[in-house]
Image (cartoon, rainbow, N blue to C red):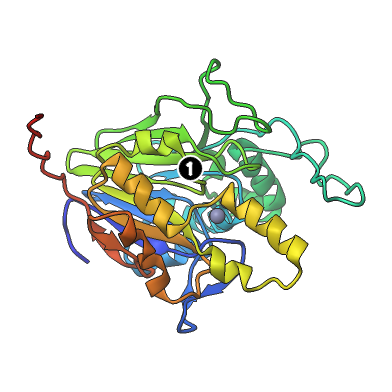
Amino acid sequence: MTDSPMRVVTLGTAGGPRWWADHLGAPRFGIATAIVVGDRWYLVDCGDGAGHQAKAVGLSMVDLGGIFLTHMHSDHLVDLPSLVLFGAFELKSKVGGPIPIVGPGDRGRLTPLSPRATSSPEVVAPQRPTPGVAGLMDGLLAAYATDINDRIFDSLAKSPRDTFAVREIALPSDCGFDPDHAVAPEMAPIEVFRDDLVTVTATLVSHHPMAPAFAYRIDSAHGSVTISGDTAPCENLVRLASGTDLLLHEAIDLDNLAAQYSDTEMLQATLDHHRRSHTTPADAGRIATRAGAAHLALHHLVPSYVHPEVWHDAKTTFEGPLSIPQDLETLVVSRTEEPAPRVLA
Ligand SMILES: [Zn+2]
Ligand SMILES: [Zn+2]
Protein backbone atom coordinates (compact mmCIF):
# COMPACT_ATOMS: atom_id res chain seq x y z
CA MET A 1 0.00 0.00 0.00
CA THR A 2 1.15 3.47 -0.77
CA ASP A 3 2.22 5.58 2.18
CA SER A 4 0.83 8.85 0.82
CA PRO A 5 -0.44 11.02 3.67
CA MET A 6 -4.10 10.83 2.59
CA ARG A 7 -5.68 7.93 0.77
CA VAL A 8 -8.90 6.00 0.41
CA VAL A 9 -9.00 2.22 0.72
CA THR A 10 -12.17 0.65 -0.68
CA LEU A 11 -12.94 -2.07 1.88
CA GLY A 12 -16.17 -3.00 0.09
CA THR A 13 -17.73 -1.65 -3.09
CA ALA A 14 -21.06 -3.48 -3.49
CA GLY A 15 -24.42 -1.97 -2.58
CA GLY A 16 -27.58 -3.71 -1.43
CA PRO A 17 -28.42 -6.24 1.28
CA ARG A 18 -27.00 -9.45 -0.24
CA TRP A 19 -23.74 -11.39 -0.35
CA TRP A 20 -22.47 -10.03 -3.63
CA ALA A 21 -20.01 -11.15 -6.29
CA ASP A 22 -18.42 -9.29 -9.19
CA HIS A 23 -18.82 -10.13 -12.90
CA LEU A 24 -16.21 -12.90 -12.60
CA GLY A 25 -17.87 -14.47 -9.56
CA ALA A 26 -15.32 -13.21 -7.03
CA PRO A 27 -16.76 -11.71 -3.83
CA ARG A 28 -17.49 -8.00 -3.74
CA PHE A 29 -17.90 -7.03 -0.12
CA GLY A 30 -20.49 -4.64 1.26
CA ILE A 31 -20.06 -0.90 1.14
CA ALA A 32 -17.35 0.35 3.51
CA THR A 33 -14.68 2.97 2.83
CA ALA A 34 -11.55 3.72 4.84
CA ILE A 35 -10.03 7.19 4.65
CA VAL A 36 -6.45 7.05 5.89
CA VAL A 37 -4.82 10.27 7.05
CA GLY A 38 -1.30 9.90 8.44
CA ASP A 39 -1.36 7.06 10.96
CA ARG A 40 -5.09 7.31 11.62
CA TRP A 41 -8.09 6.08 9.64
CA TYR A 42 -11.77 6.90 9.48
CA LEU A 43 -14.47 4.53 8.34
CA VAL A 44 -17.54 5.52 6.35
CA ASP A 45 -20.19 2.78 6.54
CA CYS A 46 -19.80 -0.76 7.85
CA GLY A 47 -21.04 -3.08 5.11
CA ASP A 48 -20.59 -6.83 5.04
CA GLY A 49 -16.98 -7.79 5.78
CA ALA A 50 -15.76 -4.31 6.80
CA GLY A 51 -13.87 -5.54 9.87
CA HIS A 52 -12.25 -8.40 8.01
CA GLN A 53 -11.28 -6.23 5.06
CA ALA A 54 -9.76 -3.56 7.34
CA LYS A 55 -7.68 -6.27 9.00
CA ALA A 56 -6.59 -7.55 5.56
CA VAL A 57 -5.00 -4.20 4.72
CA GLY A 58 -3.44 -3.73 8.15
CA LEU A 59 -5.84 -1.08 9.49
CA SER A 60 -5.99 -1.53 13.26
CA MET A 61 -8.91 -0.62 15.51
CA VAL A 62 -6.40 1.19 17.73
CA ASP A 63 -5.82 3.72 14.94
CA LEU A 64 -9.50 4.18 14.07
CA GLY A 65 -10.45 7.83 14.54
CA GLY A 66 -14.19 7.56 13.91
CA ILE A 67 -17.02 5.64 12.27
CA PHE A 68 -19.45 7.60 10.09
CA LEU A 69 -22.72 5.94 9.08
CA THR A 70 -24.58 7.44 6.14
CA HIS A 71 -28.04 5.98 6.84
CA MET A 72 -29.79 3.09 8.51
CA HIS A 73 -30.01 0.57 5.64
CA SER A 74 -28.50 -2.75 6.69
CA ASP A 75 -26.05 -2.97 3.78
CA HIS A 76 -24.27 0.00 5.42
CA LEU A 77 -24.45 -1.30 9.01
CA VAL A 78 -24.32 -5.06 9.08
CA ASP A 79 -20.68 -5.35 10.16
CA LEU A 80 -20.93 -2.78 12.96
CA PRO A 81 -21.51 -5.57 15.51
CA SER A 82 -18.21 -7.23 14.60
CA LEU A 83 -16.31 -3.93 14.87
CA VAL A 84 -17.85 -3.23 18.28
CA LEU A 85 -17.58 -6.77 19.68
CA PHE A 86 -14.44 -8.20 18.07
CA GLY A 87 -12.77 -4.80 17.96
CA ALA A 88 -12.86 -4.70 21.76
CA PHE A 89 -9.92 -7.10 21.89
CA GLU A 90 -7.70 -4.81 19.82
CA LEU A 91 -8.89 -1.80 21.80
CA LYS A 92 -7.81 -3.17 25.19
CA SER A 93 -4.55 -1.26 24.92
CA LYS A 94 -5.98 1.89 23.31
CA VAL A 95 -5.24 5.14 25.05
CA GLY A 96 -7.35 8.24 24.59
CA GLY A 97 -11.09 8.66 24.42
CA PRO A 98 -13.80 6.48 22.92
CA ILE A 99 -14.19 6.07 19.15
CA PRO A 100 -17.09 8.21 17.93
CA ILE A 101 -19.85 6.55 15.93
CA VAL A 102 -21.51 9.39 14.03
CA GLY A 103 -24.74 8.99 12.09
CA PRO A 104 -28.43 9.76 11.71
CA GLY A 105 -30.94 10.08 14.51
CA ASP A 106 -34.34 8.41 14.69
CA ARG A 107 -36.52 8.87 11.59
CA GLY A 108 -39.28 10.01 13.94
CA ARG A 109 -42.15 8.44 12.01
CA LEU A 110 -42.77 5.00 10.59
CA THR A 111 -42.18 4.77 6.83
CA PRO A 112 -45.55 5.36 5.11
CA LEU A 113 -47.28 2.23 3.86
CA SER A 114 -46.99 1.78 0.09
CA PRO A 115 -50.21 2.58 -1.81
CA ARG A 116 -49.69 -0.80 -3.51
CA ALA A 117 -50.06 -2.64 -0.18
CA THR A 118 -53.00 -5.01 -0.04
CA SER A 119 -52.81 -5.68 3.71
CA SER A 120 -51.56 -3.91 6.82
CA PRO A 121 -48.24 -5.39 7.98
CA GLU A 122 -47.34 -5.76 11.64
CA VAL A 123 -44.75 -3.22 12.83
CA VAL A 124 -41.47 -4.68 14.06
CA ALA A 125 -40.32 -3.31 17.43
CA PRO A 126 -43.33 -0.96 17.77
CA GLN A 127 -41.88 0.72 20.86
CA ARG A 128 -38.94 2.05 18.77
CA PRO A 129 -39.64 1.24 15.10
CA THR A 130 -37.25 3.66 13.35
CA PRO A 131 -34.09 3.95 15.50
CA GLY A 132 -31.06 6.00 14.53
CA VAL A 133 -27.51 5.11 15.57
CA ALA A 134 -28.22 5.53 19.31
CA GLY A 135 -31.10 3.06 19.13
CA LEU A 136 -29.02 0.76 16.94
CA MET A 137 -26.22 0.70 19.50
CA ASP A 138 -28.65 0.22 22.42
CA GLY A 139 -30.24 -2.70 20.61
CA LEU A 140 -26.92 -4.19 19.59
CA LEU A 141 -25.55 -4.12 23.13
CA ALA A 142 -28.82 -5.52 24.50
CA ALA A 143 -28.81 -8.35 21.95
CA TYR A 144 -25.23 -9.31 22.82
CA ALA A 145 -25.50 -8.57 26.56
CA THR A 146 -24.74 -12.14 27.67
CA ASP A 147 -21.43 -12.08 25.79
CA ILE A 148 -20.54 -8.51 26.74
CA ASN A 149 -21.34 -8.92 30.45
CA ASP A 150 -19.50 -12.24 30.55
CA ARG A 151 -16.37 -10.52 29.29
CA ILE A 152 -16.77 -7.41 31.45
CA PHE A 153 -17.43 -9.32 34.69
CA ASP A 154 -15.30 -12.40 34.22
CA SER A 155 -12.44 -11.22 31.98
CA LEU A 156 -12.49 -7.58 33.18
CA ALA A 157 -12.86 -6.38 29.57
CA LYS A 158 -13.75 -2.78 28.84
CA SER A 159 -17.41 -2.07 28.13
CA PRO A 160 -18.27 -1.04 24.56
CA ARG A 161 -20.06 1.87 26.27
CA ASP A 162 -16.59 3.15 27.20
CA THR A 163 -14.79 2.33 23.95
CA PHE A 164 -17.39 3.79 21.57
CA ALA A 165 -19.37 7.02 21.82
CA VAL A 166 -22.51 7.47 19.71
CA ARG A 167 -23.19 10.92 18.29
CA GLU A 168 -26.43 11.39 16.39
CA ILE A 169 -26.29 14.28 13.91
CA ALA A 170 -28.53 17.14 15.01
CA LEU A 171 -30.19 18.82 12.04
CA PRO A 172 -30.59 22.58 12.03
CA SER A 173 -34.10 23.15 13.39
CA ASP A 174 -34.96 25.52 10.55
CA CYS A 175 -33.71 23.35 7.66
CA GLY A 176 -37.18 22.14 6.66
CA PHE A 177 -36.45 18.42 6.92
CA ASP A 178 -39.49 16.13 6.92
CA PRO A 179 -38.89 12.37 6.70
CA ASP A 180 -41.91 11.82 4.44
CA HIS A 181 -42.10 14.98 2.34
CA ALA A 182 -38.71 16.77 2.37
CA VAL A 183 -35.84 14.34 2.91
CA ALA A 184 -33.15 16.64 1.51
CA PRO A 185 -34.19 20.30 1.72
CA GLU A 186 -31.49 22.65 0.47
CA MET A 187 -29.03 23.25 3.30
CA ALA A 188 -25.47 24.34 3.95
CA PRO A 189 -23.14 21.49 5.00
CA ILE A 190 -22.82 21.09 8.77
CA GLU A 191 -19.71 20.13 10.71
CA VAL A 192 -20.22 16.80 12.49
CA PHE A 193 -16.69 15.95 13.66
CA ARG A 194 -13.27 17.51 14.04
CA ASP A 195 -9.94 16.32 15.41
CA ASP A 196 -6.34 17.43 14.85
CA LEU A 197 -6.19 15.74 11.41
CA VAL A 198 -9.61 16.05 9.79
CA THR A 199 -12.82 18.01 9.68
CA VAL A 200 -15.93 16.08 8.67
CA THR A 201 -18.96 17.85 7.26
CA ALA A 202 -22.29 16.33 6.27
CA THR A 203 -25.40 17.16 4.32
CA LEU A 204 -28.81 15.57 3.83
CA VAL A 205 -29.17 13.58 0.62
CA SER A 206 -32.16 12.18 -1.20
CA HIS A 207 -32.67 8.48 -0.47
CA HIS A 208 -36.43 8.49 -0.02
CA PRO A 209 -38.08 7.00 2.02
CA MET A 210 -34.95 6.36 4.10
CA ALA A 211 -34.37 9.52 6.12
CA PRO A 212 -32.33 11.13 7.38
CA ALA A 213 -29.58 10.01 4.96
CA PHE A 214 -26.23 11.77 4.84
CA ALA A 215 -23.25 12.35 2.56
CA TYR A 216 -19.91 13.10 4.24
CA ARG A 217 -16.90 15.17 3.29
CA ILE A 218 -13.55 14.63 5.01
CA ASP A 219 -11.06 17.49 4.71
CA SER A 220 -7.45 17.27 5.86
CA ALA A 221 -4.31 19.31 5.22
CA HIS A 222 -3.62 17.00 2.27
CA GLY A 223 -6.93 17.12 0.42
CA SER A 224 -10.59 16.22 0.57
CA VAL A 225 -12.78 13.20 -0.02
CA THR A 226 -16.56 13.33 -0.45
CA ILE A 227 -18.73 10.23 -0.11
CA SER A 228 -22.26 10.43 -1.48
CA GLY A 229 -23.92 7.75 0.62
CA ASP A 230 -27.04 6.41 -1.08
CA THR A 231 -28.82 9.13 -2.99
CA ALA A 232 -30.63 10.17 -6.12
CA PRO A 233 -29.00 13.14 -7.88
CA CYS A 234 -29.00 15.78 -5.17
CA GLU A 235 -28.19 19.52 -5.08
CA ASN A 236 -26.97 19.28 -1.49
CA LEU A 237 -24.32 16.82 -2.63
CA VAL A 238 -23.13 19.16 -5.40
CA ARG A 239 -22.65 21.81 -2.73
CA LEU A 240 -20.90 19.48 -0.27
CA ALA A 241 -18.57 18.14 -2.98
CA SER A 242 -17.70 21.56 -4.40
CA GLY A 243 -14.05 21.49 -5.53
CA THR A 244 -13.40 18.14 -3.80
CA ASP A 245 -10.27 16.20 -4.71
CA LEU A 246 -12.06 12.84 -4.82
CA LEU A 247 -15.79 12.15 -5.04
CA LEU A 248 -16.92 8.60 -4.32
CA HIS A 249 -20.44 8.36 -5.68
CA GLU A 250 -22.90 5.48 -5.58
CA ALA A 251 -24.10 4.08 -8.91
CA ILE A 252 -26.93 1.89 -10.11
CA ASP A 253 -27.43 0.20 -13.47
CA LEU A 254 -31.16 0.35 -14.13
CA ASP A 255 -31.02 -1.66 -17.38
CA ASN A 256 -29.54 -4.68 -15.65
CA LEU A 257 -32.02 -4.40 -12.81
CA ALA A 258 -34.92 -4.09 -15.25
CA ALA A 259 -33.84 -7.29 -16.99
CA GLN A 260 -34.66 -9.22 -13.81
CA TYR A 261 -38.40 -8.42 -13.97
CA SER A 262 -41.01 -9.89 -16.30
CA ASP A 263 -44.00 -8.40 -14.43
CA THR A 264 -44.57 -4.93 -15.90
CA GLU A 265 -46.16 -3.39 -12.80
CA MET A 266 -43.46 -4.72 -10.51
CA LEU A 267 -40.81 -3.48 -12.95
CA GLN A 268 -42.28 0.03 -12.96
CA ALA A 269 -42.56 0.09 -9.17
CA THR A 270 -38.94 -1.02 -8.81
CA LEU A 271 -37.65 1.47 -11.37
CA ASP A 272 -39.67 4.28 -9.74
CA HIS A 273 -38.13 3.41 -6.38
CA HIS A 274 -34.56 3.28 -7.69
CA ARG A 275 -34.88 6.46 -9.75
CA ARG A 276 -35.85 8.47 -6.70
CA SER A 277 -33.30 6.95 -4.36
CA HIS A 278 -30.20 6.08 -6.46
CA THR A 279 -28.04 7.52 -9.27
CA THR A 280 -27.04 6.24 -12.71
CA PRO A 281 -23.36 6.43 -13.75
CA ALA A 282 -24.13 9.23 -16.23
CA ASP A 283 -25.88 11.25 -13.52
CA ALA A 284 -22.99 10.62 -11.11
CA GLY A 285 -20.71 12.07 -13.81
CA ARG A 286 -22.97 15.13 -14.11
CA ILE A 287 -22.85 15.66 -10.34
CA ALA A 288 -19.04 15.38 -10.35
CA THR A 289 -18.78 17.87 -13.22
CA ARG A 290 -21.10 20.37 -11.57
CA ALA A 291 -19.28 20.06 -8.25
CA GLY A 292 -15.90 20.54 -9.95
CA ALA A 293 -14.59 17.28 -8.46
CA ALA A 294 -11.03 16.51 -9.54
CA HIS A 295 -11.49 12.71 -9.57
CA LEU A 296 -14.64 10.57 -9.60
CA ALA A 297 -14.82 7.00 -8.31
CA LEU A 298 -18.02 4.94 -8.45
CA HIS A 299 -18.80 2.49 -5.66
CA HIS A 300 -21.88 0.97 -3.97
CA LEU A 301 -22.32 -0.70 -7.35
CA VAL A 302 -25.82 -2.14 -7.87
CA PRO A 303 -25.96 -4.79 -9.11
CA SER A 304 -22.37 -5.67 -8.33
CA TYR A 305 -22.03 -8.32 -11.02
CA VAL A 306 -22.46 -6.24 -14.18
CA HIS A 307 -19.47 -5.83 -16.45
CA PRO A 308 -17.26 -2.94 -15.28
CA GLU A 309 -17.65 -1.32 -18.70
CA VAL A 310 -21.25 -0.37 -17.76
CA TRP A 311 -19.98 2.08 -15.14
CA HIS A 312 -17.84 3.87 -17.72
CA ASP A 313 -21.00 5.59 -18.86
CA ALA A 314 -19.94 8.26 -16.35
CA LYS A 315 -17.27 9.28 -18.89
CA THR A 316 -20.00 10.70 -21.13
CA THR A 317 -20.70 13.38 -18.52
CA PHE A 318 -17.40 13.76 -16.63
CA GLU A 319 -14.11 14.53 -18.35
CA GLY A 320 -11.78 14.06 -15.38
CA PRO A 321 -10.23 10.80 -14.19
CA LEU A 322 -12.79 8.06 -13.44
CA SER A 323 -12.11 5.04 -11.22
CA ILE A 324 -14.22 1.93 -10.78
CA PRO A 325 -12.34 0.46 -7.85
CA GLN A 326 -12.35 -3.18 -6.83
CA ASP A 327 -12.41 -4.06 -3.15
CA LEU A 328 -9.16 -3.23 -1.35
CA GLU A 329 -7.99 -0.71 -3.92
CA THR A 330 -6.12 2.39 -2.81
CA LEU A 331 -6.95 5.81 -4.26
CA VAL A 332 -4.43 8.49 -3.45
CA VAL A 333 -5.90 11.83 -2.40
CA SER A 334 -3.87 14.94 -3.03
CA ARG A 335 -4.85 18.53 -3.16
CA THR A 336 -5.68 19.55 -6.68
CA GLU A 337 -4.02 22.62 -8.10
CA GLU A 338 -6.43 25.51 -8.15
CA PRO A 339 -7.63 25.88 -11.74
CA ALA A 340 -6.17 28.88 -13.56
CA PRO A 341 -8.55 31.83 -13.34
CA ARG A 342 -10.68 32.13 -16.43
CA VAL A 343 -10.48 35.37 -18.34
CA LEU A 344 -13.97 36.67 -18.92
CA ALA A 345 -14.71 38.14 -22.32
ZN1 LIG B 1 -27.03 0.97 0.18
ZN1 LIG C 1 -29.65 2.72 1.22
User: In the image, is 177 to the left or to the right of 340?
Assistant: right
Instruction: Give the amino acid type for the residue marked by disc 1 in the picture.
Output: Thr
- Which quadrant is the N terminus positioned in? bottom left
Point out residue 135 in the picture as x, y percentages from the top left corner.
66, 38
User: In the image, is 125 to the left or to the right of 138?
Assistant: right
Which residue is label 1 attached to? Answer: 163
- Which quadrant is the C terminus positioned in? top left
Point out residue 37 in the picture as x, y percentages from the top left corner.
24, 48
The quadrant in which residue 337 appears is top left
Q: Which residue occupies the foreground of this view, 270 or 91?
A: 270
Q: Residue, x 81% and y 47% (percent of image)?
A: 124
The quadrant in which residue 82 appears is bottom right
- Tell me which image quadrant ligand 1 sits in: bottom right
* Circle 1 SS class: helix
User: In the image, is 58 to the left or to the right of 98?
Assistant: left
Residue 82 is at least partly visible in this image: yes
Q: Which residue occupies the foreground of this view, 94 or 175?
A: 175
Point out residue 210 in the picture as x, y percentages from the top left corner.
63, 42
Q: Residue, x 74% and y 40% (percent of image)?
A: 111
Q: Which residue occupies the foreground of this view, 204 or 328?
A: 204
